Amino acid sequence: MKKLALLVAAALMCASMAACGSSSSSSASGSASASTSGSASASASTSTEATASGEETTGDTLIMGTNAAFPPYEYYENDQIVGIDADIAKALGEKLGKEVTIEDMDFNSLITAVQTGKIDMVLAGMTVTPDREENVNFTDSYATGIQSIIVPEDSEITGPDDLAGHKIGVQESTTGHIYCADDYGEDNVIAYTTGANAVEALKTGKVDAVVIDNEPAKAFVEANEGLKVLDTEYTVEDYAIAVSKENTELLDELNTALAELKEDGTIQSIIDKYITAE
Amino acid sequence: MREWFLSHYQEFLHDFNQSFIEDDRWLYIVKGLGITITVAVGALILGVIFGVIVAVIRSAHDQRKHKKTKDLGYYILGVLDFFCKIYLTVIRGTPMMVQLLIMYFVIFASSTNTTMVAILAFGINSGAYVAEIIRGGIMSIDAGQMEAGRSLGLNYIKTMRYIIIPQAIKNILPALGNEMITLLKDTSLVTVIGLKDMVKGALIIQGRTYQAFLPLVLVAIIYLILVIILSKLLTLLERRLRESDRR
């Protein structure tokens, strides 16, 4: 009995200390949010496009940046980066008479790298979105990617139209994440750091569907029983090459070369080489 | 020089606009702040409750160890102490992120209340550290204090209440403050279970705009402000408690 009384006394005492802590943090939140919104509205009207003088980066080499963890577009094979993007870059290099070297880096760093001139172009299965277009120039599209929907086999979801009102799992910062957040609201979308975690959440019923690129989707379904990829894709998106805003010359060159490669069927044959038609 | 400055200033304005103003993206950060604080405060309260319970059991057991009469209470305490030790070993011996993922994907696999799962995971984790901090504070008081209290006719609880705890608190506070700060910052791990805290907000913005700098710096500044406020309050509390000190 004495123990119990002591326990309650100590718990109460510490609870009062905890109360101190809580009030401090909530007051902090108030001031922080206020200052955020204040500064936000202050500079809302003064957005201006940055004016930077064009700089020429002509040479014999063309540095391509990519994130080599995205089969079949780019992945490692015996220490070599191969895949659709790598082959297309090589074909482009031949057309332009330049040697192509490939740099592997984080997907999120690619845009910054191309902006600062560390790399000349990005081929990384990168989808064109208006936000990205503000920071880089995109060439014409050279391939299309598919965002697929994975659901449990007994799911009532049969297509993208049924997704509304359901919890959707996605991989953080992918286009699937961005599109789902736009279409169904950020609150209905749960972003996981890896696609595997999103699929795990689907298996345990935390989300009702997972939207992810078609190729990994197929791999996940193969590895996990009771899941299926819906026949109707969520969306089809255009992959394009990103180049620096300041390097319009390269943009024009790449567009011309791309058009020629499309014309003579080189690009289609590269894609067919990696993605076997179903 | 002036042109350089102007062009960079305009670039900054553009980046700022894209990172926070367009589509009301600052809301990600503000809503995230709410989640961060909810999880931190919830976990703190839980952690302190767990910590106190474990610390009381552990130190009561330690103080009774050398008693010659072994009554029923002694054995109950022994069993409780054993479980507390397991709790401390497991929780302190495994990474927070792993605990969080296990809580989310295994133990509460069927729960969809992610915030609650996060609060529980962090509360349980923090409790282990708080327990040892509090036990350390109680143990730091000289055994003579307890003996003196008891020989003056105070019972165990009264000795604790009027002699041991008031002295122990002063030793506990700095370390407890440390734990609170660590807990607040550790909540950023909830991004792995898909909870939209402040860091997740910054990552969402980054994923959309490909601008990492501003969102991450803003989040860092907000954390810094939170921690500064927290440590200021702790200092005030500490000063108040030390008013009677001669040190």
Image (cartoon, rainbow, N blue to C red):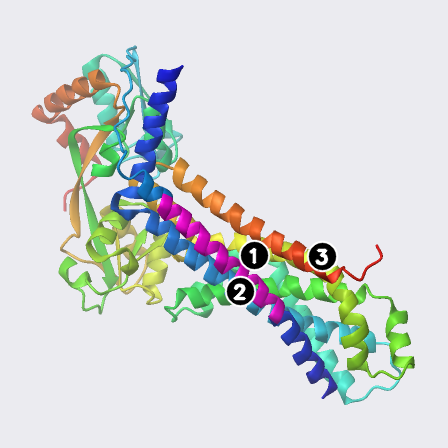
Q: Quadrant of the N terminus of chain A?
A: bottom right
Tell me the kind of residue under disc 3.
Arg
Give the chain of mark 2. Answer: B
Left or right: residue A265 versus residue A19 is left
Give how far across and how far down residue A100 sits, in percent: 30, 19
Left or right: residue B151 versus residue A135 is right
Tell me the kind of residue under disc 1.
Leu
Asked whether the residues under the numbered discs 1 and 3 touch, taking CB atoms below 8 Å apart as contact, a structural biologist would say no
Q: Of the residues under marks 1 and 3, which one precedes in the sequence?
A: 1
Front-most of residues A202 and B245 = B245
Which residue corresponds to mark 2?
A: B43
User: Residue B193, located in which quarter of the rendered image?
Assistant: bottom left
Which residue corresponds to mark 3?
A: B239
- Describe the element under mark 2 as helix, strand or loop: helix
Main secondary-structure element of the magenta-colored stretch: helix
User: Residue A13, located in which quarter of the rendered image?
Assistant: bottom right
Give the chain of mark 3. Answer: B
Which residue corresponds to mark 1?
A: B183
- Describe the element under mark 3 as helix, strand or loop: helix
Asked whether the residues under the numbered discs 3 and 2 touch, taking CB atoms below 8 Å apart as contact, a structural biologist would say no
Farthest top residue?
Answer: A59
